[in-house]
Image (cartoon, helix red, strand yellow):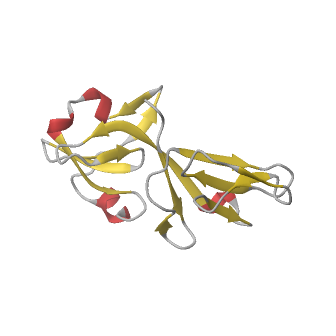
Amino acid sequence: MIPKFRAWDSRKKVWIGNLFDNIFVSSGGHGGALLIRKSNEIVLNRELGLYTNDTDYLIKDLPLSYVHIQMSTGIRDKHNQEIFVGDIVKMYSGELLLVVLDHGMFVPVCLYVSEVFEKVGNIFENPELLEHPDFRG
């Protein structure tokens, strides 16, 4: 499986694009930059020290502390939605659980078959779910 990532811009409160196959973070003496690569072609940009083209999303001068990168688990819920670290899933019991990476496993989704849970939100767009009475953190 090729790792998939997504990125959340906490200043603008938006996802940076959709799902991307490759995310690169480079400091390179330029104060940090995030390059989300959507294609296989990369061309030289000597000023930035990065290689980019029009199909890439390049963030310059965005402190990386504002960017939250989350990895896909490679698993889909019962509605075929892709599950990422940071998503909140509802178990068949009604419990709400946060998807985390723990000791190399995506918990809870690697412990159950995907037909028994559904994605109901994520920590950025639905933080209120973390306070829900059914949330088990």
Between 95 and 125, the one nearer to me in the picture: 125
Residue depicted at 18% across the width and 48% down the height: 79
Residue farthest left in this picture: 93
Rendered location of residue 127, percent (x, y)? 37, 63
Left or right of 45? Residue 85 is left
Left or right of 45? Residue 121 is left
Residue depicted at 45% across the width and 35% down the height: 101
Q: Where 116 sits versus 132, above or below? A: above
Rendered location of residue 130, percent (x, y)? 34, 57
Count of all numbered marks drawn on residues in the image: 0
Residue depicted at 42% across the width and 44% down the height: 85
Left or right of 73? Residue 71 is right
Q: Quadrant of the N terminus?
A: top left
Q: Where 104 sits versus 67, above or below? A: above
Residue farthest bottom in this picture: 12
Left or right of 28? Residue 4 is left
Whether residue 137 is visible, yes or no, is no
Residue 77: quarter of image: top left
Between 65 and 62, the one nearer to me in the picture: 62
Rendered location of residue 104, percent (x, y)? 47, 26
Residue depicted at 23% across the width and 56% down the height: 133
Between 98 and 136, the one nearer to me in the picture: 98
Q: Quadrant of the C terminus?
A: top left
Whether residue 51 is visible, yes or no, is yes
